[in-house]
Image (tube, helix red, strand yellow):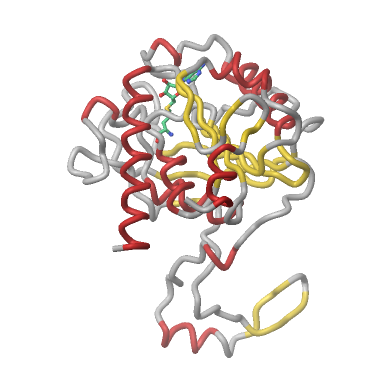
Amino acid sequence: MTRANQARRCAKIGEFVLDCVYLTDSLEAMKRLPDECVDLVICDGPYGITQNSWDKISGIQEFNLELMKVFSRVLKVGGSLYLFGKHNCLDFIDYRLYLRLNSRIVWYQPSRLGQGRKSYTNNYDIIAYLSKGQAKTFNLEDIRVPQLVELEHRKRCEKVPSVVNGKFSKTKFNPNGKNPGDVWGDIKQLTYKSKELVNREVLNTIQKPKALMKRLIDASSNPMDIIFDPFAGTGTSLVVSRETGRHFLGFEIDPQLHKVCLDRLEEAGRNIQHQLFG
Ligand SMILES: C[S@@+](CC[C@H](N)C(=O)[O-])C[C@H]1O[C@@H](n2cnc3c(N)ncnc32)[C@H](O)[C@@H]1O
């Protein structure tokens, strides 16, 4: 192991060793994180809707506000936060003292099994995208998605004037794709058939697709940045962090999920070694 690698292995934030996931109660452990120590927080924690004991939160908005206070302390200036939840996860609370809301991303899931009887079936999660001041990183080039319109139609459109910033100009289509926008229907929820599903018990309430975490991480961090996931679950964000050359720190309260996390991280490490050295 090179000296640089050795040094990186022992790097710490406060008392916590970098590139580790801790079996701990995040609400307590986060108090011991130093100020302004991470570049990106991915918070896929309680939604306040399932029967999981950790999800029984009496007021999800107030709970999220307390989390946002902590995140604004531990984020570096210009760092970003993605906060997962349902449609009302930010209602009736004033978080503007702490963080700036840039987008409410709708993660659209058309094929929900549970159908509503008394109201409309819920077909999306919210991923609130916030930052501590102006976001310092937004790598649009790394998250472009294919243009929806076909090439011939695009060429026709490029000859038609359209309104941009109040002025008339030609419609331009970037050949590398378009901004994914704030409604994401292109990344599917995991199903029983998904190869990346670690086991059936974690479906729906827990494990998120790697592609979803990858878009957040690619957009809002750079290699060597530090990503913090306070509710790591099966460790999807941490695995993607490792695969994309980011540093990470995770907390998880459930011993079984913590073990899953460790196994997935080890496997990711092995795959990287294999790619590098064959
Ligand atoms: C929605 S899941 C996270 C799923 C994760 N993004 C994944 O892809 O696997 C939320 C996780 O937060 C954990 N959790 C809930 N309360 C916690 C706490 N106070 N401290 C640490 N972990 C907690 C739960 O055990 C659960 O695994």
| Ligand 1 shown in quarter | top left
Viewer-proximal residue, 156 or 238? 238
State the residue at coordinates (52%, 34%). Answer: 84
Q: Is residue 82 above or below residue 211?
A: above
Picture quarter containing residue 123?
top left
State the residue at coordinates (71%, 42%). Answer: 131
Q: Is residue 178 above or below residue 222?
A: below
**231 relative position to 220: left or right:** left
Picture quarter containing residue 40?
top right
Residue found at the very far right of the displayed protein: 97
**238 relative position to 83: left or right:** left
State the residue at coordinates (39%, 55%). Answer: 186
Q: Position of residue 215 (x, y in %)?
A: 49, 53
Q: Position of residue 158 (x, y in %)?
A: 56, 86
Quarter holding the C terminus is bottom left
Q: Position of residue 238 (x, y in %)?
A: 46, 40
Residue found at the very far left of the displayed protein: 193
**270 relative position to 231: left or right:** left
Q: How many marks?
A: 0
Picture quarter containing residue 196?
top left
State the residue at coordinates (31%, 43%). Answer: 267
Q: Position of residue 24 (x, y in %)?
A: 49, 17
Viewer-proximal residue, 114 or 277? 277
Q: Is residue 140 above or below residue 236?
A: below
Viewer-proximal residue, 32 or 168? 32
Viewer-proximal residue, 23 or 180? 23
